[in-house]
Image (cartoon, rainbow, N blue to C red):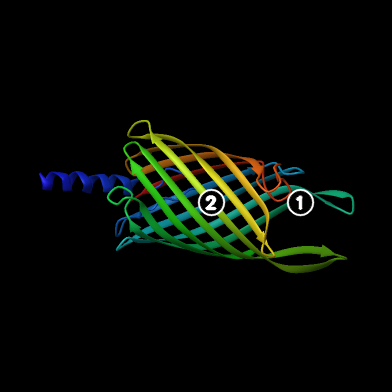
Amino acid sequence: MKNILFLILFFSILTINAQDRLFTYTYQTNVLNKGQKELEVWTTMKNVRENFYRAFNHKLEFEIGLGSRLQTAFYLNYGYLLSIKTENNIESLNSENSYSFANEWKLKLTDPVVNPIGSALYFEYTLGTEETAFEGKVLLDKQIGKTTQAFNIVGEYAIVNDFTVHDSLINIKKEQEINLELIYGFSYNLNKNLSFGFELFNKNRIEENKIKYAIFSAGPCLSYNIEGFWINVTYLPQITNLKTGSKELLKNELMQTRLIFSYVF
């Protein structure tokens, strides 16, 4: 009887590891098995600020399991945005491109099925044309029956290069950014391949030891997986700026949509 229970638990954990993401913004604690590899393709579309604004951020991620509950990943990132800028009462169309490389490390501490709660630690650094960033996360999740819940506490520190042109001279100003994010995801398995849920996202920008804004966004998410392949999508509109009670559209978008698909081999 013990052997049967062990086999059921073992294959349940393997099934979870084969689909380690049900969300696009919220991270879960599961890691790849030793030697297992995964290729992920991300696209995030951001729309609507005070003036016309549209941006696309793309990621190509390669993950590999290292064993002992540890995995690492490497990202190639590309971003493109088109916006209208106003300077000296003159509007102009502005386009920007950005490129960066990122490396993440994820250490699983406890399992969301075997233990009372799943937990993991996450660290990522990014080196790019516009910024250098460091990000740490505490990951928590729990799977009960057909439901999965996950909660992330995220801290990010970035040094951003701000380029401006004045009298034909290019000025470079370095700015520091500190963000604290709280992210929650809930998913329900409709069947063995399809899951539906929602994600909640709270982004807090900290400047001079004060919260400049506290954006709250929420929206539905959908996940579909078959053997070795999964695809997730989330629509995440901004609900409000918790600090002011109205939307913040100067530095933040009204709508975000993120699509991730992956192949495990």
Residue of label 1: 94
The answer to whether 79 appears left or right of 110 in the picture is: right
Tag of residue 182:
2
Above or below residue 155? Residue 242 is above
Please name the amino acid that badge 1 sits on. Answer: Asn
The amino acid at mark 2 is: Leu
- Image height of 79 relative to 227, above or below: below
In the visual, does 1 lie left or right of 29? Answer: left
Q: Earlier in the sequence, mark 2 or mark 1?
A: 1
Q: Quadrant of residue 122?
A: bottom left
**Real-space Cα distance between discs 2 and 1?**
31 Å
| Image point (88%, 65%), residue name | 167
Q: Nearer the viewer, residue 86 or 251?
A: 251
Q: Is residue 118 visible?
A: yes
Residue 142 x %, y %: 37, 46
Of tags 2 and 1, the one toward the viewer is 2
Left or right of 29 in this view: 79: right
